[in-house]
Image (cartoon, helix red, strand yellow):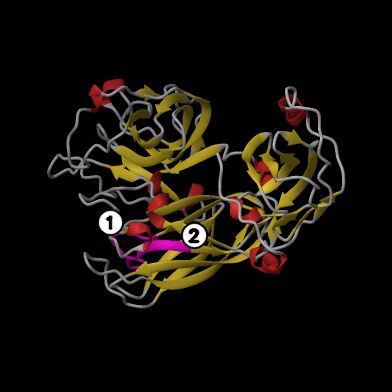
């Protein structure tokens, strides 16, 4: 795939500089094995070898070869060709190619069927740890939170055309997996709206409450034809590598602690340092996706209507009982009670899933047997859909742990997710004779990629 290469005079060098320079130079070199094999049918070199190759501040320069009318160039990243073309001139704006990481570059002179030998250079294109933007709606596991309207709200005036609303109960909010290039304390900014100021949302990082967003400006709620978020900021501490960041409400409809906030987007302000993105490969892909129960849409039967209207506020941890992310979802007692997560899978794949749960013996109740169902469309919260019409995978053999005392299941089941949107349900099903249970979280672990539908 070719992209436009901008050939720049040296006077423009400062305008295309990355955050910090990574300088490499080469006056001569030997061709790579890939380049040599591609030249097996080429005529014998009749042009000189490109010399004086230098990469500095985003600009790649090299010496002119006598008689050359152009130069064949190739950029490789981790063994893959990311750009190749024939260019004129002796300077290339590498930053315009959108490359980052350790780049292997090869070049040779050409002219009317004549070619020169390949010369090579390896250099680093550094990225900048600047402002990182998180669109709230992209990190939303809960599309319902017990009401008919979705927490995902479309509005063309919002950043990226959408925002998150309806964060009403304990533990509800957004959950971000973030790969940080470095450890440190950084400013974290929330752009919000509220008509009930002052309001608060807690910020949990890697399982600890680190800060509280104070939303003191009364902006009004988001509405059709109107939306005007304002910022509020805190400081959070990140580790180098993977971090989990939750922005959530603490308290429920009974005490309304923290009031209510709608979230548009968040900005993590890096320190401006330069880094090689390839250095982050040591941390790998996110090995486990944690589906926090309180971050999903709880499903619970309304005792008056008999419909699954899903109002089920989470239990907040205390000095004795500690929960992942600070909350435990209880009251999973009737057929189809449980939790629904909206999860975006980057590929069609098989995942294993287990549970962190609590259960106690209650009036001779049965042992807990959480079941998992996957769909590509949400099952309406107030519809009494027959989940027995869906394929379910059940974790059997769980024991009592005692109420509010969480243990992680040693067993798991495998589920199939399609690329893109998936809805994952963890439910109590009468058809498998499951007893009551409380749910802390489920861990979703990638097993293998599948062909998909």
Question: As drawn, which residue projects farthest toward the left?
Answer: 305
Asked if residue 380 lies left or right of residue 416, the reply is left
Asked if residue 380 lies left or right of residue 276, the reply is left
Viewer-closest of 192 and 46:
46
Asked if residue 48 lies left or right of residue 425, the reply is right
In the rendered image, which quarter contains the C terminus? top left
Q: Secondary structure at mark 2?
A: strand
Inspect this view and state whether residue 152 appears: yes
Question: As drawn, which residue projects farthest toward the bottom?
Answer: 217
In the rendered image, the vertical position of residue 57 relative to residue 177, given as above or below: below
Region of the chain picked out in magenta, as a range:
249-266
Query: Could you tell me residue 342's position as x and y percent?
Result: 36, 42
- Name the image quarter holding residue 332: top left
How would you classify the magenta stretch by its main secondary structure? Answer: loop
In the rendered image, which quarter contains the N terminus? top right
Question: Which residue appears at 41% of the width and 50% of the height?
Answer: 138
Q: Secondary structure at mark 1?
A: strand
Residue 262 colored magenta?
yes
Question: Which residue appears at 39% of the width and 30% of the height?
Answer: 418
Query: Could you tell me residue 407's position as x and y percent?
Result: 50, 36
Residue named by callout 2: 133
Question: Which residue appears at 64% of the width and 67% of the height?
Answer: 15
Residue named by callout 1: 154
Mark 1 and mark 2 in contact? Answer it, CB < 8 Å.
no
């Amino acid at each position: 795939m070719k992209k436009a290469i901008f050939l720049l005079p040296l006077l423009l060098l400062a305008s295309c500089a990355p955050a910090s320079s990574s300088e490499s130079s080469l006056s001569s070199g030997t061709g790579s094995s890939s380049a040599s094999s591609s030249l097996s049918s080429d005529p014998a070199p009749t042009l000189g070898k490109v010399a004086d190759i230098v990469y500095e501040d985003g600009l790649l320069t090299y010496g002119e070869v006598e008689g050359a009318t152009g130069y064949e160039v190739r950029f490789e990243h981790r063994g893959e060709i990311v750009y190749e073309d024939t260019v004129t001139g002796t300077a290339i704006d590498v930053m315009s190619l959108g490359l980052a990481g350790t780049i292997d570059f090869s070049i040779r002179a050409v002219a009317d069927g004549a070619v020169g030998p390949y010369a090579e250079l390896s250099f680093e294109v550094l990225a900048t740890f600047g402002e990182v933007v998180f669109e709230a709606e992209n990190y939303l596991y809960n599309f319902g939170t017990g009401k008919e309207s979705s927490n995902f709200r479309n509005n063309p005036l919002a950043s990226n055309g959408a925002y998150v609303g309806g964060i009403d109960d304990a533990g509800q909010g957004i959950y971000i997996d973030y790969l940080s290039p470095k450890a440190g304390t950084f400013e974290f900014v929330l752009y919000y709206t509220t008509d009930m100021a002052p309001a608060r949302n807690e910020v949990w990082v890697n399982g600890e409450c680190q800060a509280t967003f104070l939303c003191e400006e009364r902006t009004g709620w988001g509405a059709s034809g109107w939306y005007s978020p304002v910022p509020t900021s805190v400081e959070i501490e990140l580790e180098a590598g993977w971090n989990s960041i939750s922005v959530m409400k603490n308290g429920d409809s009974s005490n309304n602690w923290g009031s209510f906030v709608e979230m548009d987007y968040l900005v993590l302000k890096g320190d401006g340092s330069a880094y090689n993105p390839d250095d982050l490969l040591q941390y790998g892909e996110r090995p486990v996706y944690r589906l926090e129960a309180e971050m999903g849409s709880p499903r619970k039967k309304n005792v008056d209507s008999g419909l699954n209207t899903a109002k089920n506020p989470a239990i907040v941890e205390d000095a004795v009982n500690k929960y992942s992310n600070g909350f435990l979802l209880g009251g999973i007692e009737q057929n189809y009670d449980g939790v629904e997560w909206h999860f975006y899978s980057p590929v069609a794949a098989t995942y294993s899933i287990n549970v962190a749960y609590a259960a106690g013996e209650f009036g001779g109740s049965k042992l807990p047997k959480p079941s998992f169902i996957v769909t590509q469309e949400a099952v309406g919260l107030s519809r009494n859909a027959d989940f027995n019409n869906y394929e379910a995978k059940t974790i059997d053999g769980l024991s009592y742990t005692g109420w509010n005392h969480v243990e992680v299941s040693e067993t798991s089941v495998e589920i199939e997710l399609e690329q893109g949107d998936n809805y994952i349900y963890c439910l109590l099903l009468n058809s498998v004779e499951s007893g009551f249970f409380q749910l802390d979280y489920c861990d979703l672990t990638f097993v293998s990629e599948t062909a998909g539908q």
